[in-house]
Image: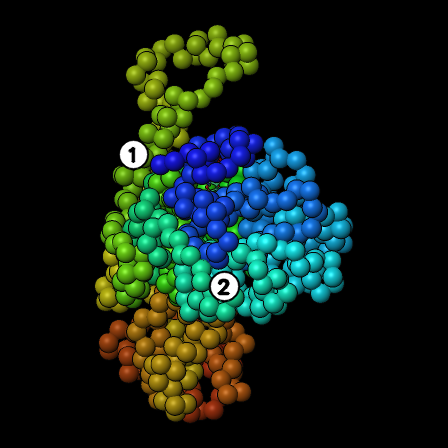
Amino acid sequence: MSLFSELGLRQAVVNALTDLGYEQPTPIQEQTIPQILTSQNDLKAFAQTGTGKTAAFSLPIIEQIDSDSKATQAIILSPTRELAIQIGKNIKEFSKYLNNINVITVYGGANIEEQIRGLKKGAQIVVGTPGRTVDLIKRKHLKLQHIKWLVLDEADEMLNMGFKEDLDKILEVTPQEKQTLLFSATFPKEVDAIAKNYMYDPVEISAGKRNIGADSVTHEYYLVSERNRYPALKRLADVNPDIYGIVFCRTRRETKDIAAKLIADGYNADSLHGDLSQAQRDIVMEKFRAKHLQILVATDVAARGLDVNDLTHIINYKLPDQTENYTHRSGRTGRAGKEGISIAIITNKEKGKLRPIEKKISKSFTHKQVPNGREICEKQLFKLIEKVKDVEVNDEQINPYLENIYAQLKDIDHDELIKRFVSIEFNQFLSYYEDADDLNGDDSKERRRSSDENFTRFYINLGKMDRLNPAKLMGIINENLNKNDVEIGQIEILKSFSFFEIDKAYADETLKAFKNADYNGRAIIVEITTKPKRRDRNRSRRKFSSDRRSGGGFNNRKKSSGGYGSSKKGNRYSSSKPTSRRSRR
Ligand code: AMP
């Protein structure tokens, strides 16, 4: 492996890199730096996030910028504001020992006037998001006629995010003779089309095989039932006390839910999703970057551009719909030569999603077992011992109390003393995990057999007469609950009414969801009921049928059917979360 100085960079740039701790170029840097320095050819580079691609395109540009001219000579386009800011910051750091090199970053959601003032002062390098760049071109504040380099960073992401039109506009106003440098982790046909339309005979560079996940990432999956997905997540966090990771969810709603649950359960977590304002996003990201947060729960879009290097784990709380997104997610760990783990928590139904991902990343997932209580306690215990070993003692503060402390503890011998101190924290884990279940495996079939225990049974005033069938009923349930991953147990469709079972954790939510629901304009009535013993069954059916026939009105019947459960009874089924562990965190 060569050194930066051997790649043709000036000593002033090499010194700045040394300050940043960059000792040797990464493989993509080793290839692109000499190529861009010595050739005018366009370049297509296959590079994952975290491979050092920012320096790969920035360093040779910085090296060749004409600092005597104030004209904009390089435009770097990036999909997100965060990534643009990061690139701008990196370029400033790389060029700190060079005189008269100005870089400005322009992006949406921020004051345009300030950005215009910056452009007026003259910036040889402009980093921008596509939308704001087009805006500034239209306002004639950003002039691209002297552009020598155009960089499309994370081209696939830019197209995914719908920036095709903006890119076309920008590409059209740049001079023909510029050098275009396109960096992308994946090359779907849309990216190839950009390359075909706007690049001339590009040189291709690839740091590793196309679409391959970083080598330092191991991929694991945990097979659980739907209801154990969240408890499994907690156990994974508990068995990794030093976790610093992102938990990916598929929707904003799920992101908020999971983050709220983790926070309530005492974890050092927060969420990042599209409903946050830019200022809120900035706060969360800063907390996470500064490691004041250990777990960030995020959607794919919201986490884009979040540049954090030493993530220990990526957890796919739910696998993404598009295989490519898995590559983006897992590429956030195992960066800059560090090891990383990408975890998928899946149910039996989702097992089929693993194969296409394995094909894409050319690596296999390892099936791991959700840790049991004993394993977690052991991990936490030794974490505690480590903490004791590493703790900094403030002699000045503690000394005045020592005499009294020694006096009080004088009758407890050394071994016993250690046991007691350790137990203070350890006991909380022991009691929390004392009777912890085995969460492995998708137990939904068994659960169906023991449905009384895990499901709540509901009555609904719709039946065959209403052309109800199981699929239709499931649709009605999902629609009213506004969820499609709640486990539904047995369904019994009768003539004028039906029964269905739902994961008991959602019993209260189900009652609430159906409170004002209607079906073709008629009020839906849903009530908790119990499964009648066999001999009572026909009687209960007759009772409900006669209610419907008697035309007593649905509200009347609601009262008369009190024997079959009321919403009060529903409380019994509400999910009983273990007591909050906030105290120990
Ligand atoms: P990037 O792919 O440009 O987002 O870079 C990923 C991370 O690796 C960034 O935090 C860089 O600061 C870091 N990095 C890039 N190049 C090097 C290098 N040659 N040596 C050490 N760290 C690097």
- Asked which quadrant contains residue 501, the reply is bottom left
Given residues 3 and 334, the one toward you in this image is: 3
Give the answer, above or below, for where 369 lies relative to 463.
Answer: above
Q: Residue at x 30, y 16 (%)?
A: 415
Q: Split into 4 quadrants, where in the image is the N terminus? A: top left
For label 2, the crowd category at 10 Å Cα-Cα, with few meaning under 14, some 14 to 19 and many 20 or more, is: many
**Label 2 SS:** loop
Given residues 385 and 116, the one toward you in this image is: 116
Mark 2: amino acid: Met
Q: Residue at x 35, y 25 (%)?
A: 385
Q: From the Cβ of disc 2, is ligand 1 less than 8 Å away?
A: no
Q: Position of residue 183 (x, y in %)?
A: 47, 55
Q: Position of residue 160 (x, y in %)?
A: 49, 65
Give the answer, above or below, for where 527 lies relative to 155.
Answer: below
Residue labelled with disc 1: 378
- Asked which quadrant contains residue 137, the reply is bottom right
Instruction: Describe residue 287's horizontal placement relative to residue 465 as left or right.
Output: right
Q: Position of residue 390 (x, y in %)?
A: 41, 22
Foreground label between 1 and 2: 2
**Label 1 SS:** helix
Q: Residue at x 35, y 17 (%)?
A: 417
Marks 1 and 2, the one that precedes in the sequence: 2
Residue labelled with disc 2: 199
The answer to whether residue 63 of the structure is visible from this angle is yes
